[in-house]
Image: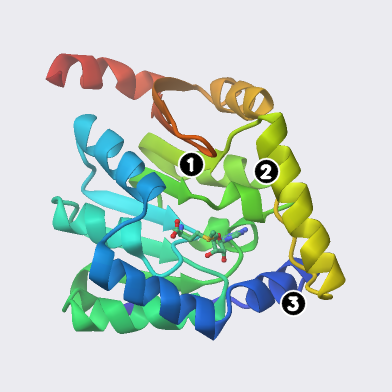
Amino acid sequence: MTIRWLLCCSSFWAANQRQFSDAIARRDLERYRTRGPDATTRLLRDAILRAGNGKTVLDVGAGIGALSFELLAAGAERMTAVEPAPDYFASAHEEVRRRNLADRFELICGDFVAVASDVAEADVVTLDRVICCYPAYRPLLEAALQRSRRLFAFSYPRDRWYVRAAVAIQNLLRALRRNPFRGFVHSAREMEALLEHHGFLRIERREALKWSADLYVRADAATDLRASA
Ligand SMILES: C[S@@+](CC[C@H](N)C(=O)[O-])C[C@H]1O[C@@H](n2cnc3c(N)ncnc32)[C@H](O)[C@@H]1O
């Protein structure tokens, strides 16, 4: 397994580390081991498999690595997972070794916006529930799109009043507890416009009460997808 630490010291880094603590990482790993992937992870996995999994996958904001493990189990050959929270990173590392996947896994600890230029392109790039943890969706999406050779899959909170209200209440409670982490509901329409501007076409959208899970294909790879359908 290749491991890289590309540390930084922004206020995002500190807040993210506080939110995704050792307790949260252990809870998520235990839940994944006992119950399998959460709903958004299943939606993204299934959409990617319907479009034809890639040989190489880049999982940005991998957490404990649930989507990475699902796509490797479904036939992907190599995985690069980028995760800035040290406790999530440690749990992903533990699970990679437990599953004997070290020779197919590269783990990078860092903020993807800061480290993207050091990360190789992949057939499939994923962000599962990541964009809502980062204040600026634009540089994060652009960095991810530049690394995708074919598919781009991401899940994000739906741009609805009740989701915005719930996230605002969560942020208020965090402020009262002096937790600097904040959640964000970015505009779905603006994100879609950005994706289209960078030459990606949406081929699937599945929506649950809170989450949307979208799959995009690079326009110049869309004919291959239709041919193999
Ligand atoms: C809610 S967790 C989701 C983890 C995992 N993708 C999942 O769905 O279980 C959000 C994740 O996004 C990561 N994240 C947020 N901003 C990031 C960035 N700029 N670069 C890489 N990861 C980021 C956080 O560290 C955290 O692991």
Specify the amino acid type for callout 2. Answer: Tyr
Q: Which quarter holds ligand 1?
A: bottom right
Specify the amino acid type for callout 1. Answer: Ser
Residue mark closest to the camera, 2 vs 1: 1
Q: Give how far apart the Cα atoms at labels 3 and 2 are.
A: 19 Å
- The residue at the point 84 percent across, 75 percent down is 178
- Out of 6 and 69, give the one closest to the viewer: 69
Residue 195 at what x, y percent from top left?
Answer: 56, 27
Quarter of image, res 163: top right
Kindly identify which residue carries mark 1.
155
Disc on the earlier residue, 3 or 2 = 3
Specify the amino acid type for callout 3. Answer: Cys
Kindly identify which residue carries mark 2.
137
**Is 189 rendered above or below residue 184?**
above
Disc on the earlier residue, 2 or 1 = 2
Kindly identify which residue carries mark 3.
9
Residue 202 seen in this snapshot? yes
Quarter of the figure with the N terminus: bottom left
Residue 225 at what x, y percent from top left?
Answer: 23, 21
Quarter of the figure with the C terminus: top left
Q: Give how far apart the Cα atoms at labels 3 and 1 are.
A: 27 Å
Decide if ligand 1 comes within 8 Å of the CB at mark 1: yes
Report if the CB atoms under discs 3 and 1 are less than 8 Å apart. Answer: no
**Is 177 rendered above or below residue 227?**
below
- The residue at the point 70 percent across, 54 percent down is 183
Circle 1 Cα neighbour tier, 10 Å, few/some/many (<14 / 14–19 / ≥20): many
Disc on the earlier residue, 3 or 1 = 3
Report if the CB atoms under discs 2 and 1 are less than 8 Å apart. Answer: no
**Is 210 rendered above or below residue 133?**
above
